[in-house]
């Protein structure tokens, strides 16, 4: 058939045989229908299944799978022959573009031929043409165009800045752009959702269209946090039903602001399809997803494969819909007695979480992590929180000190709040300090 290049198909399969990790680059980009050769279709389907089962992709595992499942033609000798045809895996992206081009042309040809032979009517022809995904457009920009565009972008800076209370983050990161994926990582109950509440309020006040997609709490629970943040009302008052008249009056004042001025929506979602639909419907400037590990899996994948797939999909959606995505992700629980500052390899489930992100923010609330259970009263001094920028695609990394009021979900910049923070203090150190204090008081007497 015309518009078929089995040599390119062979090279693509060969690249995957040489470097199985390349498959992660093409999840949701191509499938077996992009291949015209039955042999390469079968091999690609085996690679898909091995990846879904978290099995290493190489010649041995593929040939063993083919033998165990009576798949003909996929022998070790055939696989090595395919692998040896590859000029260089470094040109994989170029090979992929050619494969998409041939696949697109082949599908168009088949549809028009079916219409010519009377196998389908004009409605089915139009429907089929609309469903076929266009290959990437060839970039026709000259170097001069690119330079001038870069100068224009440099003058305006990034598309978004973090809110005022997070200005120290802006000093390190410079802000972020549409299409960026920002990962916020931390241990359970380490303040990730509270951080996103504070960011939501700040972004809305800056007149951005913000969509919060929550997999953990209801839209009503999320609104309670926003009201607690904006009006300095302890969240537990909502839960216990102990709001006072003054609290209600403060909340009522906020209704016109949130309802008529803010561009804010909060949707409860469960699976990736819900996330895609919500972003397409609300077209946000910034989407906040809370959180990655809670996205339901409909394919029964391993945790590694599932989180890799979802992280990639969210990154692709952000770029396709021209929105910035802030994605929350959990850490493994720390080992007993081994509390330390967070690292990128603490992410639960998949190394691709850190690979895909433009910016990574890791939260470290030492006092909460060491003590687990904290009791706080209204009016107490803020907690000491660190936001560690461990990845920044275009610049610096470093730590930002913050003052955190968990009961109000409020975050304050280090220099913007005069109150002293509460640091973690071990029981032994605290008892020694109390002993010294009492000793001095006794001697002074």
Image (cartoon, grey):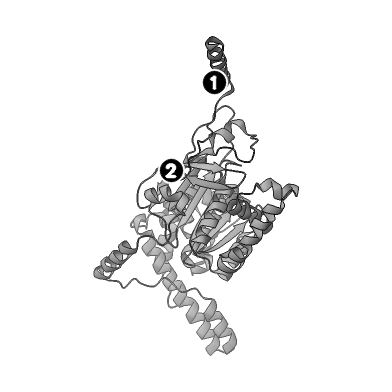
From the image, tell me which residue sits under label 2. 415
Q: Identify the residue at horizontal 63%, vertical 41% (top origin).
A: 378
Give the vertical position of 83 relative to 125 (above or below): above
On the image, the x and y values in percent for residue 81 come to 41, 55
- Is residue 214 rendered to the left or right of residue 159? right
Q: Camera-side residue: 336 or 174?
A: 174
Q: Identify the residue at horizontal 45%, vertical 62% (top origin).
A: 179
Q: Residues within 10 Å of mark 1 (few under 14, many from 20)?
A: few
- Is residue 355 rendered to the left or right of residue 126? left
Give the vertical position of 325 relative to 426 (above or below): below
On the image, the x and y values in percent for residue 182 come to 47, 53
Query: What kind of element bears circle 1?
Result: helix
Q: Camera-side residue: 193 or 360?
A: 193
Q: Identify the residue at horizontal 49%, vertical 35% (top origin).
A: 341
Q: Nearer the viewer, mark 1 or mark 2?
A: 2
Q: Identify the residue at horizontal 64%, vertical 55% (top origin).
A: 222
Tell me if label 1 and label 2 are in contact, CB under 8 Å. Answer: no
Q: Camera-side residue: 442 or 388?
A: 442
Q: Residues within 10 Å of mark 2 (few under 14, many from 20)?
A: few
The disc at residue 429 is 1
On the image, the x and y values in percent for residue 235 come to 66, 48
Query: What kind of element bears circle 2?
Result: loop
């Amino acid at each position: 058939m015309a518009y078929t290049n089995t040599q390119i198909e062979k090279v693509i399969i060969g690249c995957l045989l040489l470097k199985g990790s390349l498959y992660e680059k093409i999840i949701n980009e191509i499938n077996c229908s992009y291949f015209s050769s039955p042999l390469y279709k079968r091999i690609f389907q085996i690679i898909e299944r091995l990846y879904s089962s978290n099995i290493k992709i190489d010649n041995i595992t593929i040939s063993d799978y083919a033998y165990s499942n009576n798949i003909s033609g996929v022998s070790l000798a055939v696989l090595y022959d395919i692998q040896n045809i590859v000029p260089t895996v470094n040109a994989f992206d170029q090979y992929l573009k050619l494969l998409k081009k041939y696949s697109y042309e082949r599908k168009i040809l088949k549809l028009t031929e079916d219409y010519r032979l009377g196998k389908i009517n004009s409605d089915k022809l139009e429907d089929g043409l609309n469903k076929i995904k266009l290959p990437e457009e060839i970039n026709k920009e000259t170097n001069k165009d690119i330079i001038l565009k870069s100068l224009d972008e440099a003058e305006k800076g990034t598309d978004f800045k973090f809110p005022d209370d997070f200005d120290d983050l802006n000093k390190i990161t410079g802000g972020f752009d549409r299409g960026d994926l920002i990962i916020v990582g931390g241990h359970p109950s380490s303040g990730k959702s509270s951080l996103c509440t504070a960011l939501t309020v700040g972004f809305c006040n800056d007149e951005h269209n913000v969509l919060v997609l929550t997999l953990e709490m209801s839209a009503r629970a999320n609104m309670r946090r926003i009201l607690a943040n904006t009006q300095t009302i302890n969240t537990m008052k909502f839960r216990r039903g102990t709001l006072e008249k003054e609290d209600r009056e403060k909340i009522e004042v906020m209704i016109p602001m949130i309802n008529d001025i803010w561009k804010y929506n909060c949707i409860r979602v469960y699976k990736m399809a819900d996330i895609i639909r919500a972003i397409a419907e609300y077209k946000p400037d910034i989407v906040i997803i809370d959180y990655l590990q809670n996205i339901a899996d409909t394919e029964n994948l391993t945790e590694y494969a599932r989180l890799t797939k979802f992280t990639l999909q969210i990154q692709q959606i952000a770029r396709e819909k021209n929105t910035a995505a802030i994605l929350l992700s959990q850490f493994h629980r720390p080992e007993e007695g081994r509390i330390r500052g967070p690292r990128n390899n603490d992410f639960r489930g998949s190394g691709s979480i850190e690979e895909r992100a433009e910016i990574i923010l890791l939260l470290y609330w030492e006092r909460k992590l060491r003590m687990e259970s904290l009791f706080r009263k209204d009016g107490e001094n803020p907690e000491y929180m660190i936001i560690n920028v461990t990845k920044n695609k275009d610049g610096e990394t470093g730590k930002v000190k913050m003052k955190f009021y968990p009961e109000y979900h409020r975050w304050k910049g280090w220099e913007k709040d005069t109150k002293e923070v509460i640091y973690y203090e071990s029981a032994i150190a605290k008892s020694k300090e109390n002993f010294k204090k009492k000793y001095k008081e006794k001697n002074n007497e």
